[in-house]
Amino acid sequence: MTEKQPAKYIRISDRKQKTERQQNTTDKLYIDIISGKTKFADRPAAQQLMQDIEAGLISQVSTHEVSRFGRSLKDVIDTVTYMQDKGVNIHIANINMHSIIDGKPNPIFNMIVSILANISVQELETLRERQAEGIRLAMLNPDKKYKGRVAGSKITPEERCANNQPIVKLLKSNAKGKTSLSMRQIAAITNKNLSTVQRVSNDFKAMGGGQFFYNPVADMFAPPSEPAVKR
């Protein structure tokens, strides 16, 4: 019987991108050079990986970050669920999180993956919106330049929390005892600087752990019925 081995899945958009930092000498490599919008199951290397999983050859799949599996929440969840159903341990390298710990499912893995995938989708959509808006404004005002924040002005704790709602979401989860994530883990999950997470955490605590202006339009996790202001 062939012994199972760990695998590493790498996806890059073009050949100019480097993959050396994502590689090691022990895992079997599966590398796709393809757009992230292509479904995982339609990628050549991913298809080979799935064939090897079906053949019982793979014990673990490691990838640098969740977005390598897909650019849509559904694609990421479908891919993760498929691997879990096959008994494959999934390792997300940038936050060093495993789906299986000591032979048992990690109870917070799926929640964290869902948050990461949502953040990735939101960041991509925001980037596209900003690019489109920037082009539109540049065409309307070719001589106008952005001068940045007014000198001497400061962002308020309420504004900081409202502008960093993915971080606040995880801080609330910690406060309720659902998770016990460190500041560094939250920074990795939300793709923010550690200093930003610490500042948001300090403001969050100073305001009593959640009393801030809430914008449901900016919050990807907000249910449709949630009110615009929490008091």
Image: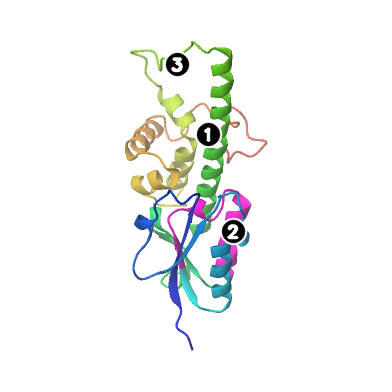
Secondary structure of the residue carrying tag 1 is helix
- Whichever of labels 2 and 1 marks the residue nearer the N terminus, that label is 2
**Callout 2 crowding tier (Cα within 10 Å): few <14, some 14–19, many ≥20:** many
**Residue furthest out toward the right:** 225
Tell me residue 126's x, y (percent): 55, 33
**Which residue is tagged 3?**
146
- Of mark 3 and mark 1, the one earlier in the sequence is 1
Kindly state the secondary structure of the residue where label 2 is placed. helix
Q: Examine the rendering and report whether any part of residue 195 can be seen.
A: yes
Question: In the rendered view, does 81 fall on the left or right side of 98?
Answer: right
Q: CA distance from mark 2 to mark 3?
A: 39 Å
Give the residue at x 58% y 75%.
54
Q: Is residue 49 above or below residue 67?
A: below
Given residues 201 and 81, the one toward you in this image is 81
User: Does 161 sit above or below residue 182?
Assistant: above
**Tag 3, which secondary structure?**
loop
Amino acid of disc 1: Leu
Query: Which residue is at a point 55% across and 73% down the rendered structure image?
Result: 53
Res 162 label? none
Look at the magenta stretch and give its main secondary structure.
Answer: helix
- Residue on which disc 1 sits: 127
Q: Quadrant of residue 149?
A: top left
**As drawn, 41 above or below 72:** below
Identified by mark 2, the residue type is Phe
> What is the number of the mark on residue 40?
2
- Per the rendered image, the range of residues in magenta is 61-85
Question: Are discs 3 and 1 less than 8 Å apart at CB?
Answer: no
